[in-house]
Amino acid sequence: MDGRGAALRLSGGNRKLVVDDESAAHVRWIFARFLEIGSCTVLAREVSARGLGTSRGNRIDKKYLDRMLSNRAYIGEAVHKGESYPGEHDAIIDRETWDRVHAILQESPRKRAARTRADTPALLKGLLFGPDGAAFSPTHTRKGGRLYRYYVSQTVLKHGAGSFAVGRVPAGEIEAAVIDQLRAVFRQPVIVAGAWKTARAQDGGITEVDARETLTRLDPLWDELFPAEQARIVALLVERVDIDTDGLNVRLRVDGLSGLTREMLAGGIGEAA
């Protein structure tokens, strides 16, 4: 994909833009995927995972995606001195898709995050365990038009509630408690220092100051992140969560902390959209 239009190139003779079918398919996927997740930060990671890059071999980052999603060449227009005109090339993106994408882009990152909050994946899926070691599974019910989310023990699902002390917990409450512990971790120098030592073993260029500044920056940033990004970070940092009548215990992945440090230093996290 090239910098001009990622799917448009100049023809040799008449210097007109023509559509490159393979790259055009990538562009259509990017527009469609953005409509689903509403975040250029998350989308940039998915684009990278697909092995897509610029024609010069550079990584496609959030800023590049911002430019792509605002490139009017994709809807068959040409831009000159800030004014757009009907172009002589075929459109890659239809007007309805373009308008829907730009309706999202005009919202603030916080508002976009709130709008997608209902689609949050179960934050602790595969991570939450009860006193008997049984895993808790996410479930939900609707009452009066409202959605109520829970985590339910596999023991309860198989054998019934009975006298089981901890069989079902409200998803929002347990997830908030785990997130509170994670955010506290970002503010604890001892834990940050441990993350730095592990990160340094893999990347000697990371200093303790780097680790401290990047992880402490994540705490105030958390509420701006999209739900899918929050879930990804939880999966990266948390090995398991054990719950009983006395509370909960969050077991962290130290390698996850160091990996998160390296990712933030590389600019992989830092903006919500």
Image (cartoon, rainbow, N blue to C red):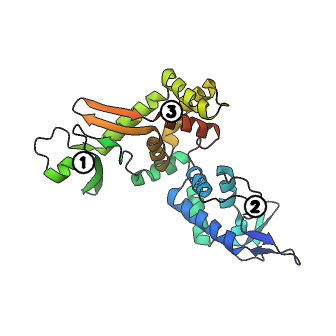
Closer to the observer: label 3 or label 2?
Answer: 2
Q: Indicate left or right for 114 with 22 as reference.
A: left
Image coords of residue 59 (percent x, y) = 69, 52
- Of mark 3 and mark 2, the one earlier in the sequence is 2
Identify the residue under disc 1.
152
Tell me the residue at 77%/75% (across/down): 18
| Residue with the mark numbered 2 | 55
Q: Nearer the viewer, residue 113 or 167?
A: 167
The amino acid on which the numbered mark 3 sits, given as a three-letter code, is Asp
Dot 2 lies on which element?
Answer: loop
Q: Which mark is residue 171?
A: none
Residue linked to disc 3? 219
**x, y percent for residue 130:** 25, 40
Q: Position of residue 125 (x, y in %)?
A: 36, 48
Binning the other alpha carbons within 10 Å of mark 3 as few (below 14), some (14 to 19) or many (20 upward) gives some
Instruction: Kindly indicate whether the residue at mark 1 contacts the one at mark 2 (C-beta within 8 angstroms).
Output: no
Compared to 15, does 225 lie above or below?
above
Earlier residue among tags 2 and 1: 2
Measured Cα–Cα span from mark 2 to mark 1: 49 Å
Q: Amino acid at mark 2?
A: Ser
